[in-house]
Amino acid sequence: QVQLVESGGGSAQAGGSLRLSCAASLYTVNSYCMAWFRQAPGKEREGVGAIYRPSAAPFYADSMKDRFTISQDSAITTVFLQMDSLKPEDAAMYFCAAGSPSACYGGSWYDSRVWPYWGQGTQVTVSS
């Protein structure tokens, strides 16, 4: 059973930074791809980025790739989302997701339907 626990959410001023963490409890860490999504009230869940192993180049949504950075620890059980230059429109519930490598490399990593495992989310608010 895969368990994902997000942390690090909170409030930030516009232009500020936050670092989110997602700790994964996995029976095996050999081949998991991990991703971040976000969902604002009244909006669909949106892919932020994904990563498969620390050595691989992450995927990013075009609108966030210049401000957000995804990284993963060497044990491949924690994924981080560094968010810089925050904007009020970044306010949302941020979710961590995990799946097989096909979730990352199947061409649709940004589609929440390809990710079978989800955390409970961590709230991010950004004040202007």
Image (cartoon, grey):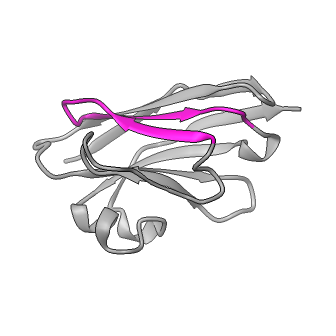
Along the line of sight, the residue nearer the viewer: 125 or 59: 59
- Residue 66: image location, x then y, percent: 62, 45
**Depicted 14 relative to depicted 106: above or below:** above
Does 123 lie within the magenta span?
Answer: no
Outermost residue to the right:
128
Q: Residue at (63%, 36%) from the top-left corner?
A: 123
**Residue 23 image-quadrant placement:** top left
Number of callouts:
0
**Depicted 123 relative to depicted 8: above or below:** below
Outermost residue to the bottom:
107
- Residue 44: image location, x then y, percent: 64, 65
Q: Dividing the image into 4 quarters, which one contains the C terminus?
A: top right
Q: Is residue 41 left or right of residue 110?
A: right
- Residue 52: image location, x then y, percent: 28, 51
Q: Residue at (35%, 50%) from the top-left corner?
A: 57
**Depicted 116 relative to depicted 34: above or below:** below
**Residue 119 image-quadrant placement:** top left
Q: Is residue 84 left or right of residue 32?
A: right
**Depicted 25 relative to depicted 105: above or below:** above
Q: Which residues are magenta?
A: 67-86
Q: Residue at (72%, 33%) from the top-left corner?
A: 85
Does 84 lie within the magenta span?
Answer: yes
Q: Is residue 90 left or right of residue 74?
A: right
- Residue 69: image location, x then y, percent: 50, 39
